Image: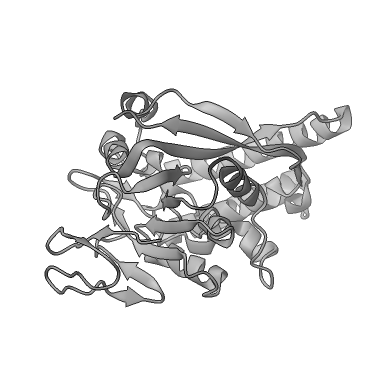
């Protein structure tokens, strides 16, 4: 597929890697095309955003616990990707905006879709490159700023966006950019899951896990707040802006996919310990470490030394929220 990009220097349409108009060559480091040189975190001025250079693989603890020797576990993301290709085929171009560790982009590329995995964080994209193992010529890893997407107007069939819009303080500008790059009739797709029925015992197991997690999380954040922690989270309403540029969404559910997850406690604690939350990206590591140490001591005394092994229980399927662009 011939996909055009915008040259960061002269804004001309170009094919990778060299601009035919000005001769600028897009730098490529660790298989990542650097369309911008913005820092991963911007908390001052206009167009603020939170990138995940400081989080990296800790964003997906399953990489630590499951994927040390297996980078093929994509669960609900793979099921959502399969649903996209079932509905729209593989002769499409997809921009995964805020692609992170490649969890959505890699299954799409594996299915044959031309996929652009764009993120502000080079650290996250480096892990995506490692996971992809250089197997997919149709997977383009691109360091881009979502406020200024380096793609021509009306050049993309589908934009995938999963839990990225809350990481920008002016989401309407990003949504407008997504609308700009989509072809007429193009889709914005957000991945989701559908809860399935649980037995009484499974519900009780999950309820207990959630109550313990809530207690531990409250203790953790109270410690941070007592030491002048300032959240970096943005209080934004992006849903209203979505409906300015896109039609109300419709829902599609993947047939035949079911996943059971019991390690919620372990994974949430991992993120807490490592400070792998967007609202902690402006917090000193020393404070995060102290908060975790005090929280761990509290949890051991209250719930026992093996509290991290408390199991939750959830069962869910895969689903898509599909928005059609207004043109």
Q: Nearer the viewer, residue 237 or 34?
A: 34
The quarter of the image holding the C terminus is: top left
Give the answer, above or below, for where 180 lies relative to 145: above
Q: How far across and down, in percent of the image, does residue 323 sit?
A: 44, 31
Question: Which residue is found at the position 33% from the left and 69% from the top?
Answer: 33
Give residue 313's quadrant in the image. top right
Relative side of 259 to 239, left or right: right
Q: How far across and down, in percent of the image, does residue 99 sit?
A: 45, 54
Question: Which residue is found at the position 17% from the left and 45% from the top?
Answer: 45
Give residue 184's quadrant in the image. top left
Q: Nearer the viewer, residue 303 or 254?
A: 254
Q: Is residue 231 visible?
A: no
Q: Is residue 83 visible?
A: yes
Relative side of 6 to 125, left or right: left
Q: How many marks?
A: 0
Give residue 256's quadrant in the image. top right
Q: Nearer the viewer, residue 236 or 129?
A: 129
Q: How is the image coloured?
A: one colour
Q: How far across and down, in percent of the image, does residue 255 sit?
A: 72, 37
Q: Nearer the viewer, residue 87 or 211?
A: 87
Relative side of 206 to 170, left or right: right
The quarter of the image holding the N terminus is: bottom left
Relative side of 39 to 63, left or right: left
Question: Which residue is found at the position 53% from the left and 60% from the top?
Answer: 109
Give the answer, above or below, for where 319 lies relative to 15: above
Question: Which residue is found at the position 19% from the left and 69% from the top?
Answer: 19
Give the answer, above or below, for where 33 lies relative to 266: below
């Amino acid at each position: 597929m011939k996909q055009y990009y915008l040259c960061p220097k002269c804004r001309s349409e170009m094919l990778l890697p060299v601009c035919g108009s000005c001769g600028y060559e897009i730098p490529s480091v660790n298989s990542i095309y650097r369309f911008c040189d913005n820092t991963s975190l911007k908390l001052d001025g206009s167009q603020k955003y939170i990138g995940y250079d400081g989080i990296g693989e800790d964003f997906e603890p399953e990489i630590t616990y499951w994927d040390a020797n297996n980078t093929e576990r994509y669960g609900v993301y793979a099921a959502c990707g399969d649903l996209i290709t079932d509905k729209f085929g593989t002769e499409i171009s997809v921009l995964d905006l805020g692609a992170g560790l490649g969890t959505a982009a890699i299954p799409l590329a594996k299915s044959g879709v031309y996929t652009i995995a764009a993120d502000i964080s080079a650290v996250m994209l480096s892990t995506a490159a490692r996971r992809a193992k250089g197997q997919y010529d149709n997977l383009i890893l691109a360091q881009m700023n979502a406020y200024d997407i380096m793609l021509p107007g009306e050049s993309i069939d589908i934009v995938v966006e999963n839990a990225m819009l809350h990481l920008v303080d002016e989401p309407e500008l990003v949504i407008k950019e997504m609308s700009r790059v989509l072809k007429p009739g193009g889709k914005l797709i957000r991945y989701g899951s559908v809860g399935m029925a649980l037995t009484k015992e499974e519900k009780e197991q999950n309820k207990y896990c959630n109550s313990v997690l809530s207690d531990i999380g409250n203790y953790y954040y109270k410690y941070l707040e007592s030491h002048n922690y300032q959240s970096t989270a943005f209080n934004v309403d992006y849903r209203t802006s979505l409906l300015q540029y896109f039609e109300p969404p419709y829902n599609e559910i993947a047939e035949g996919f079911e996943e059971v997850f019991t390690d919620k406690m372990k994974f949430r604690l991992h993120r807490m310990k490592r400070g792998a939350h967007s609202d902690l990206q402006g917090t000193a590591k020393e404070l995060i470490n102290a908060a975790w140490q005090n929280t761990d001591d509290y949890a051991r005394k209250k719930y026992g030394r093996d509290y991290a092994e408390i199991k939750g229980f959830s069962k869910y399927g895969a689903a898509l929220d599909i928005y059609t662009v207004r043109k």
